[in-house]
Image: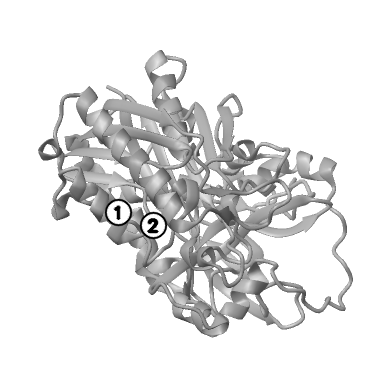
Amino acid sequence: MVGITSLGAYIPIYRLNRDEIAKIWGTKSLGGEKAVAGYDEDSLTMAVAAANNSMKREMAEIDGLFFATTTAPYKEKQSAAVIASAINLNRRCYTSDLCNSLRTGTLAIRSAIDTVNSGSAKNILVIASDCRIGAAQGKFEQILGDGAAALIIGSKDPIAIIEGMHSVFSTFTDTWRSQLDSFIRFAENRYANDVGYKPIMQDVISDIMKKYKLTPKDFSKIVFDGVAIKEHHRIAKKLGFEESQIIKPLSRDVGHTGAASSILMLIRCLEEASPGDRVLFASYGDGSDAFIFRITDQIKKIKKRTFRESLSKKIPIDYGKYLRWRNLVTEEMSTLPERPALSLPRRWRERRSILALYGYKCKQCGTPQLSPVGQTLRVCAVCQARDNFEEYKFSDKKGTIFTYSIDSLQATRNPPGLNGIVDFDGGGRLICEVTDCEPDRIHVGMPVEMTFRMMFQSNGINNYFWKAKPIRKDL
């Protein structure tokens, strides 16, 4: 039976209090806070983080990757291929981007289910990630949050099997963004709710229950996309669901995360679900996709609660830092020499080292080691054996800070720059930037893990590489 075999959520560690936004502009606060992607994060890097959190199975078992977003870093270049390289999928893996609609996350899920059912793939990794920006002083500046969600769709030991699907499309326009727009445009609130959101959600939920001859009492939980909690609950109760069955939107503590929004709600639900539960799940955006999932005994094997962990630790930021990170203000230029332009041939030659952080392991003494990017390692630093290495992956290894520096002159959108020497568990050492860490919190011996981030942009190309970040439970 086809269903969800693994799941992973990623919510950035930074939070912006909505009261601060309202205070700056003299407007009304919606209350709570929104999750904000770091200065070196975008929809692609968050997708890598969510994918790594979802990986219960070996990478070799994943034979398809569908990436859903409305904020892809490139208008002409596939993001899914970069993600697949970063998480080290087999190069014969089928990759696809689904863009331009808030519904792309569930469209990707439905496509993955159909693909697995057809037999053309065994395990499809679906990732939805978004990093949308609302214009200053507008309501979406407060509403929108950043985050990513990942599900693996397969037939081997599913934690939630698919019992039914139903979709509708709609040409209704409530939010949109053209090629020339930096910010979301939106229709009048009452019109968007009364003519678009409410009737579409009510129709798709009613239709799927009617299609499979089920009633609200047949479900343990209902999960569907929404922004305003009161409006969301009104729809559910009108359809006959009780308060205890409703999974609340992530409005107050995360914000609306675009294509990832409904899937993050589903992950939150699944992490607390019990065997035998039946869940009704629906998205919203240019129509809706609805699904019926039945929870299996395999849910007991999901030990890592990635959604809960993502909410457990956070770092508050101020509004000025938010503006700087989103490039919404012009800053004074650095007096340091400009970085050299990226070399595409060099990046291609070193793609394994750059995108998946591969080094080497000496076959004679077993010592893992990294060489500077662009240099070939030929002699073991420990036993001096020559040309006797095998590839060794560092991106999934944890480590500790051996020493560090705080650089006040470093060109970064989050000054001062933090740089550290990481000693990996099991051997190996890397000099790299340290992210998601305040300067007064870094210390020698601090446990860290690797995270895929954006270094800088050159000629329209994002230079992605790996940085160290504190393990959240140790913050």
Amino acid identity at mark 2: Val
Query: Image point 33% across, 50% down: which residue?
Result: 265
Q: Where does residue 134 sit, x and y in percent of width and height?
A: 58, 62
Secondary element at image label 1: helix
Query: Image point 55% across, 51% down: which residue?
Result: 395
Which quarter of the figure is the N terminus placed in?
top left
Q: Residue 15 carries which label?
A: none
- Contact? badges 1 and 2 (CB < 8 Å): yes
Q: In this view, does 203 lie to the left or right of 386?
A: left
Q: In this view, does 354 lie to the left or right of 295?
A: right
The total number of labels drawn is 2
Amino acid identity at mark 1: His
Mark 2, residue position: 227
Of callouts 1 and 2, the N-terminal one = 2
Q: Where does residue 76 sit, x and y in percent of width and height?
A: 73, 38
Q: Where does residue 342 sit, x and y in percent of width and height?
A: 83, 52
Residue 338 location, quadrant:
bottom right
Viewer-side residue, 373 vs 129:
129
Relative height, residue 446 to residue 204 (above, below): below
Mark 1, residue position: 232
